[in-house]
Image (cartoon, coloured by chain):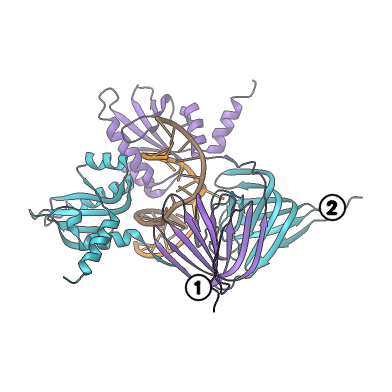
Chain colours: A purple, B cyan, C orange, D brown
DNA sequence: CCATAAATGTCGATT
DNA sequence: AATCGACGTTTATGG
């Protein structure tokens, strides 16, 4: 009589586990996806996430499961191993059928001190809020993140005439940003206490089509030199 | 006299190379980012891409470089090793200063047969094209993917009065989708044979801000139950 | 925890 | 090369 014993094991992982194996993968959830048998890298992280990599898609895996999720390993009598990764909050499942394991290593990475970033949009907005004249001569800040029904405007300013100016700030100025500012302007101009409100689209780099659209809508474009602005900020700290 | 010989090596990689090392990482490009010394996983793929992983953050690396890029290894006289990854099309650079290597393995994964996907939005459009009454009572389909100068409208329908209805279908209804439908409506309403055309924004889930904008523009919102619709579809296949 | 906007978004198709 | 839209987007942030 053939033995049909099946072993279930809930797998907990410390650090990173790296498995290179010939495997087949099936995902069912927000979409259905299937990977035929081939040799791939399977990465299991301490947060429980699982990702299956080929050797060519930059950092993006072929399939994955984001945390929180659980990984259980099922071994059939024929020695076939199936990993089933299940999302905790939905019924998404990732099934990895392993034919042959070529590498299986674990390593504890210890604590991650964390990533430090500089040059993101938030910082640009902060710098421009402190130096609104870098956007336009004589501009003064009324309020940062000025609220509207469809979200906050990055900066609301006033020019020397007392006219209201709405400023949308992007790292990269794309058409989307112009559309966004257009929506804000339409709403703000309904407010008789503010109207008329003109718009300025400020970005480190403005795409040609975005500039064309902005100009067509009477929105001014300003390209901002982040490094110079940061320099201006630094110089304001100098003693002279 | 101290030896200051420096060795440069252009590193080519077949398959995947996995290195676990105590390292420091600095990225300079579209932004600046810095990672203090800690133990991390460095993955180098055959396409030249490099990614640095901690043991959380799902599949997204802390730092990375997308192909095309080149990796060169510099060894100083003190034994310190620095990997410099440079983008080919820009001056983005990733510098990995390696203090200690805990693992260094390579493995050729061979060819990837490729991923097969079956998406939800496509299927949702197909189901709604077959059952337009799920969008609105008495609605009938004129054409799926109705062409305009700026791309096809998901569905063009007619209501019982004979009025044209443009339908934009999304899995998640966001402001972008409302903008998209607005552009289509503006174009369609220029066609005297179709005008007036009203719009319906149909999605599995519609974000509050998107709903606000849609209503403000006279666009109706319909949330669609994908599972129920799939059930409806199944029942249409039954023999009775 | 939900909602929203940014992201070194990535990725693919199309112009 | 630039643009546009989708993504199983993921991630961070504010209410």
* Rendered image: mark on residue B4: 2
Counting residues from the start of the chain, the first of labels 1 and 2 encountered is 2
Location of the N terminus of chain A (image quadrant): bottom right
Q: What is the x, y in percent for residue B66?
A: 56, 57
Q: Residue furthest right?
A: B1
- Height in image: A76 above or below C7? below
Q: Residue furthest left?
A: B161
In-front residue for pair B231/B150: B231
- Name the residue: 71% across, 53% down: B21
Whether residue B78 can be seen here:
yes
Mark 1 element type: loop
* Residue bearing mark 1: B113
Q: CA distance from mark 1 to mark 2?
A: 47 Å
In-front residue for pair B202/B69: B202
Mark 1 and 2 residues: CB-CB less than 8 Å, in contact?
no
Q: What is the x, y in percent for residue A103?
A: 65, 66
Q: Chain of mark 2?
A: B
Location of the C terminus of chain A (image quadrant): top right
D2 horizontally vs A43: left or right: left
Decide: few, some or many residues near mark 2? Use Cα within 10 Å; few <14, some 14-19, many ≥20: few
């Amino acid at each position: 009589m053939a033995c049909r014993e099946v072993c279930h094991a809930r797998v907990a992982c410390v650090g990173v586990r790296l498995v290179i194996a010939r495997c087949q993968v099936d995902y069912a959830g927000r979409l259905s996806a299937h990977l035929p048998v081939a040799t791939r890298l399977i990465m299991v992280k301490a947060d429980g996430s699982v990702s299956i990599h080929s050797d060519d898609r930059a950092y993006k895996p072929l399939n994955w499961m984001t945390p929180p999720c659980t990984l259980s390993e099922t071994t059939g009598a024929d020695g076939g191993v199936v990993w089933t990764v299940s999302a905790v909050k939905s019924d998404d499942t990732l099934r990895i059928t392993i034919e042959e394991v070529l590498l299986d290593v674990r390593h504890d990475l210890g604590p991650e001190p964390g990533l430090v970033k500089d040059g993101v949009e938030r910082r640009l907005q902060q710098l421009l809020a402190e130096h609104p004249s870098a956007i336009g001569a004589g501009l003064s800040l009324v309020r940062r993140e000025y609220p509207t029904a469809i979200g906050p405007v990055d900066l609301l300013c006033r020019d020397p005439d007392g006219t209201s100016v709405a400023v949308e700030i992007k790292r990269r100025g794309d058409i989307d940003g112009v559309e966004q500012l257009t929506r804000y302007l339409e709403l703000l101009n309904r407010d008789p206490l503010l109207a008329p409100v003109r718009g300025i689209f400020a970005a480190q780099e403005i795409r040609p089509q975005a500039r064309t659209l902005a100009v067509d809508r009477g929105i001014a474009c300003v390209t901002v030199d982040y490094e110079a602005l940061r320099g201006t900020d630094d110089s304001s700290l100098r003693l002279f």
